[in-house]
Image: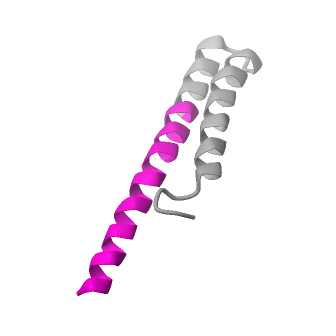
């Protein structure tokens, strides 16, 4: 892990997000339900993939400031 966190975890979250967006609408009994479930999972995984590196950067800054103080 570096300053930006674990890139493979972020890429894995984005891959899962895209996969769920494509998979659920075609494998649910109701198309609208499938799109809703796939979209919800897509949003959740995308937010996780974006927030993870930002959180890692802020944690690194916090650790640096704590070390200096």
Q: Position of residue 12 (x, y in %)?
A: 66, 44
Residue 45: within the magenta?
A: yes
In the displayed image of the protein, which residue is found farthest to the top?
A: 31
- Outermost right residue: 27
* x, y percent for residue 68: 26, 84
Q: State yes or no: residue 36 in magenta.
A: no
State the residue in front, 24 or 54. Answer: 54
Q: Position of residue 23 (x, y in %)?
A: 72, 23
Residue, x 52% and y 63% (percent of image)?
A: 2
Query: Relative to the observer, which residue lies in front, 35 or 22?
Result: 22
Residue at 46%, 43% (x, y): give it. Answer: 50
- Residue sitting at 61 percent across and 26 percent down? 38
Q: How many marks?
A: 0
In-image side of 8 versus 45 (left or right): right
Asked which colour scheme the image uses, the reply is: one colour
| The quadrant where residue 11 appears | top right
Observer-nearest of 52 and 57: 57
The residue under the point 63% across, 28% down is 18
**In the figure, 8 relative to 26: above or below?**
below
Classify 59 as above or below 68.
Answer: above
| Residue 12 against residue 2 in the figure, above or below | above
User: What is the span of residues highlighted in magenta in the rendered image?
Assistant: 41-69
In this rendering, position of residue 10 left or right of residue 58: right
Residue 48: x and y, percent? 50, 46
Q: Main secondary structure of the magenta part?
A: helix
Q: Nearer the viewer, residue 31 or 62?
A: 62
Looking at the rendering, in which quadrant would you find the N terminus? bottom right
Q: Quadrant of the C terminus?
A: bottom left
- Which quadrant of the structure image shows residue 29? top right
């Amino acid at each position: 892990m570096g300053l930006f966190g674990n890139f493979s975890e972020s890429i894995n979250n984005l891959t899962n997000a895209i996969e769920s967006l494509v998979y659920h609408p075609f494998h649910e009994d109701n198309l609208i339900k499938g799109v809703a479930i796939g979209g919800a999972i897509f949003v959740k995984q995308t937010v996780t993939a974006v927030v993870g590196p930002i959180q890692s950067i802020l944690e690194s800054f916090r650790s640096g400031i704590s070390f200096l103080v």
